[in-house]
Amino acid sequence: MRFVTWLLTNAAGIAVAAWLLGGISFDGDRWQDKIIPLLLVALIFGLVTVFVEPVVKVLSLPFIIVTIGLFLFVINALMFLLTGWIADQADIGFAVDGFWIALLGSVIVTIVTGFIDVAVLEDD
């Protein structure tokens, strides 16, 4: 059950980011055509944040310390770009147009998932 809520929370954050930002997009005209790609992208994003992001954070620890944590925004944007690249390679129909859009998108996803975690989900 925890996996399903994790996947749906990521999907909600990505959906809000795609809705608010023109540079994040899914292929398809109707929203029904975008549900499966959205869930696949949420899965990819979750796997990237679980497996790749910790390694990048450890390797960039000096930059994180020097910038007082602001480099974490860059890391989050790069993880969002990596998710878009993997989705593009898998021909899922998800696109992220550049670093700045990825930066804004990652901030939106973080805010939305944090809000859902606090407002809706209970701590186990």
Image: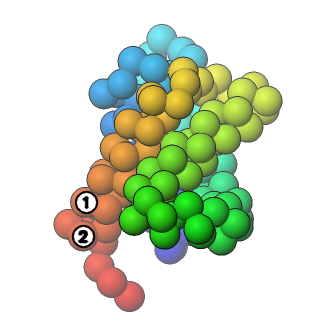
Q: Is residue 52 toward the left or the right of residue 63 in the image? A: right
Residue 101: percent from left, percent from top? 45, 28
Q: What residue is at 49 percent from the left and 35 percent from the top?
A: 102
Tell which of 99 and 96 is nearer to you.
99
Quarter-of-image position of residue 124: bottom left
Q: What residue is at 56 percent from the left and 61 percent from the top?
A: 63
**Looking at this rendering, what residue extends furthest in the top direction?**
29
Quarter-of-image position of residue 119: bottom left
Residue 74: percent from left, percent from top? 51, 47
Tell which of 111 and 2 is nearer to you.
111
Q: Which residue is mark 1?
A: 115
78 shown above or below 1: above
Amino acid identity at mark 1 = Phe
Quarter-of-image position of residue 118: bottom left
| Callout 1–callout 2 Cβ contact below 8 Å | yes
Q: Can you see residue 32?
A: no
Total marks placed: 2
Q: Secondary structure at mark 1?
A: helix
Q: Which residue is mark 2?
A: 118
Residue 32: percent from left, percent from top? 47, 26
Amino acid identity at mark 2 = Val
Q: What residue is at 48 percent from the left and 57 percent from the top?
A: 72
Q: What residue is at 60 percent from the left and 48 percent from the top?
A: 79
**Looking at this rendering, what residue extends furthest in the front direction?**
66
Q: Residues within 10 Å of mark 2 (few under 14, many from 20)?
A: few
Mark 1–mark 2 distance (CA, rounded to whole Å): 5 Å
**Looking at this rendering, what residue extends furthest in the bottom direction?**
124
**Looking at this rendering, what residue extends furthest in the right direction?**
89
Tell which of 118 and 85 is nearer to you.
85
5 shown above or below 39: below
Residue 104: percent from left, percent from top? 38, 36
